[in-house]
Structures are given as structure tokens and as C-alpha cells.
Amino acid sequence: VQLVESGGGLVQTGDALRLSCAASGSIFSINNMGWYRQAPGNQRELVAVITPGVSPNYADSVKGRFTISRDTAKNVVYLQMNDLKPEDTAVYYCNAAIKRRVGVPFTSYWGQGTQVTVSS
């Protein structure tokens, strides 16, 4: 199983970016998919998570600016980031709980990360 992120980059304050993360490989089903971020010197923190049948959950710092969505058929999760701020600068990681076949538990997988830099 692989999670591949894309869409990071260097933007200015107030700009928008859309991150994508595609899961591929031997996948039977996916439960929650989410985005985390880690800034230099900081711990990795939850940004947003989406679970089937449940309202998405967001970090307080991104509520009203970021939107997480998911294409279940394509095993893709998106993060639309609007009104970006310098404090959003971090490496953004995709995470998914994936069941590879019937009878095994869900396992957490991580992408390699994509850099988002917001200049002031």
C-alpha cells in the first residue's frame, strides 16, 4: 500500500492550495483518511480527518479555512486550504486506516509528506 501526496508548494499569505493524496496497492477498504502537519521543532499535529458517515473533524486553527473531502471510488483524499497564513507552513502528511483484505484489522499508513510554505 502506498499513499502519495501532491499539491504542496510556496505561496503567499492569503493564497490557496489544494493537496491530494492517493492510496494505491492491495486495498480492501479504507476507514478514516486525514491530513497531519509538522513544522520544524514541533510535533506532528492533526489538521483534518474524514470518516465515512461522520462529519469531518478539523483542528481549531484551520476551521473555516480548510476543507477536507474524499473520493471514495478513487481512494483519494483532498485538502483545500484557503486564506493560508505563515503559521500554516509545515510538511503535510496524508494518513489512512486501510484494511488490505477480509479478516485483518485496519492498519495506519502514511504518505511521504509534501512541503507547504507560506510567505508573509
Image (cartoon, rainbow, N blue to C red):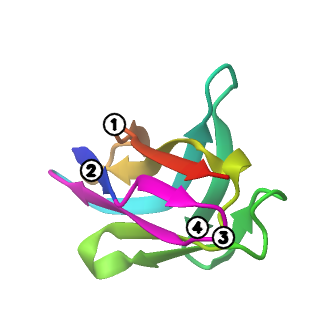
Let me know if residue 24 is in the magenta part. yes
Return the x and y of residue 71 as percentages of the image width and height: 37, 79
Answer whether labels 2 and 1 touch (C-beta < 8 Å): yes
Q: Amino acid at mark 2?
A: Val
Q: Work out which quarter of the rendered image holds the N terminus and state it.
A: top left
- In the rendered image, the vertical position of residue 75 relative to residue 45, given as above or below: below
Residue 68 in the image: above or below residue 92: below
Query: Which is more N-terminal, label 1 or label 2?
Result: 2
Dominant secondary structure (helix, strand or loop) of the stretch shown in magenta = strand
Which secondary structure lies at badge 2? strand
* Extent of the magenta region: 7-25
Dot in front, 2 or 4: 2
Identify the disc placed on residue 50: 4
Label 1 secondary element:
loop
Q: Amino acid at mark 4?
A: Ile
Q: How far apart are labels 2 and 4 at the CA level? A: 17 Å
Q: Position of residue 86 (x, y in %)?
A: 69, 49
In the rendered image, residue 7, in percent from the top left (x then y), is placed at 35, 61
Circle 3 is placed at which residue position? Answer: 14
N-terminal-most mark, 3 or 4: 3
Mark 2 or 4, nearer chain start: 2
